Amino acid sequence: MKKYILILGIFSLLLSCKKEKEYSIRSYKEHKDVSSEKPYNFNKDSIFGVYQITDKDFAICIPVQFDNEDLPFSREYGEFIIKDSTPWIYGKDMKDYKYYDTLFVEKLIYNKRFEDIFKNKISENFYIYGTKSFQKCKVKKVVFKSGECDNDYVAYILDVNKNITGNPLLASREKIPLIYGKDYSTINRLFKKMISKDRTHLVHGSEKYKPVIFANYGNLYFSYYDDFKWYIKNSNSEYQFPDRNVFEIDPKNKVHLLWSSEMDLLGISCL
């Protein structure tokens, strides 16, 4: 009986050692996979905000303004619109323009010549990061929003699969080895306190600005402010300025905003 107990004890010890060894090997492999990722250096010119603009379309939305050449594509956009006499604003014949979709909040316009010009100004492929994960996508169509309140933008519609990414948020030319953490509550409070000081949401009466951090890479944090339903007419969404942000926390716990993308659904210039 004692001999049986001794053998059983030795067997259990060997089994536990084997499990510990397997765990160590698995952990090492996981660490190796993470560390073998190409180091990522943040470049604000290679990242773009992605927004849902219809019930089926997700797009990189790049704001443009006629008198603001600091915004990418603004000069080319202004030249194109002026040359074509903006028929959709002045009530003229739409000519070879057509509305891409009018069922939702934003009336998007499609023109083949516009698409040919602006599709060549951006990459064909992007890594799209959402609330759950990421995938590599292609630009499949280019449309634009044009209005009298200067909240115009060029929309690069993507072949993204929401079932994979969750709600799409960011597009990057480079692969970002993001970590989708479980609890960013402390960092979120720091960021909200900093960014709420100058956000237009507060200037125009909404004090419910609640950014959500969804991932990080080291001390870089990625956030969004969106209810993902503002594009629907009569949705009663309070989100007039959905946004995406990338910020950094330094060793002294100071927050530094590195990049931001924002949609102006209110039409600030008309107020």
Image: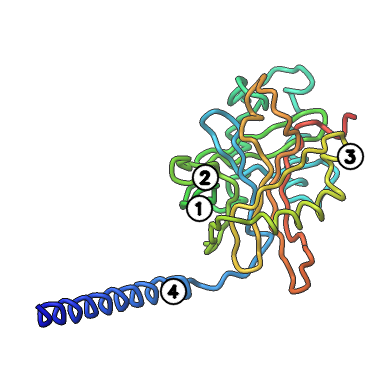
Residue 32, given in percent of the width and then of the height, sits at 42, 76
Quadrant of the rendered structure where residue 111 is? top right
Left or right of 232, for residue 193: right
Q: Which amino acid does the dot numbered 2 rest on? A: Val
Gap between marks 2 and 3, in whole Å?
Answer: 35 Å
Labels 1 and 2 touching (C-beta < 8 A):
yes
Q: Which amino acid does the dot numbered 3 rest on? A: Val
The residue that label 2 is drawn on is 139
The residue that label 3 is drawn on is 203
Label of residue 125 in the image: 1
Gap between marks 4 and 1, in whole Å?
Answer: 28 Å
Residue positioned 70% across, 58% down in the render: 186
Left or right of 139, for residue 237: right
Label of residue 208 in the image: none
Gap between marks 2 and 4, in whole Å?
Answer: 34 Å
Q: Quadrant of the N terminus?
A: bottom left
Residue positioned 74% across, 54% down in the render: 189
Q: Which element type, helix, strand or loop, lies under badge 3?
A: helix
Residue 100, given in percent of the width and then of the height, sits at 58, 26
